Image (cartoon, grey):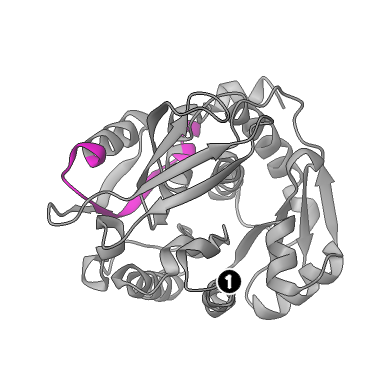
C-alpha cells in the first residue's frame, strides 16, 4: 500500500452550533488535511504536506491530525504567520457556505523550498485541491510537488473543490484549475463544479470536455449530493451509486471523505482505468460519506474501515 500525500491548506473551521445560530465551535479542517485524516482513519498512510502556524489554532489542528493517525513528516511550522479561518454557514438541511479569513496565513506560505525532493515514490498518490492554487508560495509548491510526483511514478489526484471567493474572480479560479488539470490521473468534481468549468449542464458532455483538458486522467468522479455519485472513464463508460440514506447534520468534509475513501482503496488495490473498476470504490465512499454527514465537523467525523464496512 502506497502513501497518500495531501498538499495544501490546513485551516480552522468555525461551525455554528445550529443553522442560523450565532454560537460557533472550532473544528480542524481544510480539504487536504481532511483527506489525509480520512485515509489515516481508514488504515492507510495519510500524510499532510503544508505549513502550520504555532498559534493555538494550529496546535489544535496538529493534535487532531495526529489523533486521526495522520503523518506530519512533510509538514513545517512557522510562527510568523497565523492560521487561516473559515467561517461556515449552515442551511437547515445541513448544506454549507464559507467565508474565509486567509490573507498571508501559514498555509499560503508553504514554499517550493519546503517540498522535499524524495517525498514520492512509484505507487504513491499526491492529492491536492484548487484552494491551494491561489497566487502564493503555496501554488508554486504545488507545481514542484506535482512535477516530482509524476517524475517518481506516483499518481496525482485533483479534487477541484472550487472556491471562487478566494480568487479575484470566478474566471481566475477556473483558469487556475485548467492549468493543473493536465497533470491529474484522477479528477473529482461536483455536478455544479462540472457545469462551471465546462459550461455544460449535461453531465456526459461536461465530462467529455473535462477529459480533453485533463489529458492524463483515466477517470472523473462526479458527486451529486443526495443524488449519489458517478465515475466516468475515457472510453465513455460510467458507473453510478445512490447516496447513503442518513439524517444530515453537516456536509462539511463529505466531499473530502469521498475522495479520501476512493484513494485509500486505490492505494490498497491498485489504479484502474475503467469506470467499472471503481464500483467497489463508489459503494465504499458513499457509505463513508453517509457517516460523515451524520456528524458535525470534518476531521473528527471521519470513519474507520470497520465502521464503513458495516454500512456498505
Q: Position of residue 227 (x, y in %)?
A: 81, 42
Residue 253 colored in magenta in the image: no
- Residue sitting at x 77%, y 36%: 243
**Which residue occupies 27% across, 66% down?**
115
Magenta range is 38-58
Find residue 121 and report its image quarter: bottom left
Q: Is residue 226 toward the left or the right of residue 257 in the image?
A: right
118 is higher (above) or lower (below) than 258: below
Left or right of residue 142, residue 226 in this image: right
Mark 1 highlights which residue? 170
Residue 53 highlighted magenta (yes or no): yes
Residue 117 at x, y percent in the picture: 27, 69
Q: Is residue 173 above or below residue 14?
A: below
Picture coordinates of residue 41 (x, y %)?
46, 32
Indicate the position of residue 204 as horizontal and vertical percent values.
Answer: 85, 66
- Corner quadrant of residue 283: top right
229 or 14: nearer the viewer:
14
Amino acid at each position: 500500500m502506497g502513501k497518500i500525500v495531501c498538499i495544501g491548506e490546513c485551516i480552522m473551521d468555525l461551525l455554528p452550533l445550529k443553522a442560523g445560530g450565532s454560537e460557533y465551535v472550532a473544528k480542524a479542517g481544510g480539504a487536504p488535511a481532511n483527506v489525509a485524516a480520512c485515509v489515516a482513519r481508514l488504515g492507510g498512510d495519510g500524510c499532510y504536506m503544508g505549513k502550520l502556524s504555532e498559534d493555538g489554532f494550529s496546535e489544535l489542528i496538529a493534535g487532531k491530525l495526529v489523533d486521526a493517525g495522520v503523518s506530519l513528516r512533510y509538514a513545517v511550522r512557522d510562527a510568523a504567520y497565523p492560521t487561516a479561518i473559515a467561517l461556515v454557514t449552515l442551511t437547515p438541511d445541513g448544506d454549507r457556505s464559507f467565508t474565509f479569513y486567509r490573507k498571508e496565513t501559514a498555509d499560503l506560505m508553504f514554499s517550493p523550498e519546503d517540498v522535499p525532493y524524495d517525498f514520492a515514490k512509484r505507487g504513491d498518490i499526491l492529492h491536492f485541491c484548487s484552494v491551494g492554487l491561489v497566487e502564493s508560495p503555496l501554488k508554486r509548491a504545488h507545481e514542484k510537488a506535482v512535477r516530482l510526483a509524476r517524475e517518481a511514478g506516483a499518481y496525482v489526484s485533483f479534487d477541484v473543490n472550487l472556491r471562487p471567493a478566494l480568487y479575484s474572480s470566478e474566471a481566475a479560479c477556473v483558469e487556475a484549475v485548467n492549468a493543473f488539470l493536465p497533470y491529474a490521473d484522477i479528477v473529482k468534481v461536483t455536478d455544479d463544479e462540472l457545469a462551471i468549468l465546462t459550461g455544460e449542464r449535461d453531465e456526459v458532455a461536461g465530462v467529455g470536455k473535462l477529459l480533453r483538458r485533463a489529458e492524463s486522467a483515466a477517470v472523473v468522479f462526479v458527486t451529486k449530493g443526495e443524488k449519489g455519485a458517478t465515475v466516468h472513464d475515457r472510453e465513455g463508460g460510467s458507473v453510478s451509486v445512490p447516496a447513503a440514506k442518513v439524517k444530515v447534520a453537516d456536509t462539511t468534509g463529505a466531499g473530502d471523505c469521498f475522495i479520501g475513501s476512493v484513494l485509500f482503496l486505490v492505494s490498497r488495490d491498485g489504479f484502474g482505468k475503467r469506470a467499472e473498476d471503481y464500483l467497489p470504490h463508489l459503494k465504499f465512499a458513499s457509505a463513508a460519506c453517509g457517516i460523515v454527514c451524520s456528524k458535525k465537523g470534518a476531521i473528527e467525523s471521519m470513519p474507520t474501515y470497520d465502521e464503513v464496512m458495516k454500512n456498505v
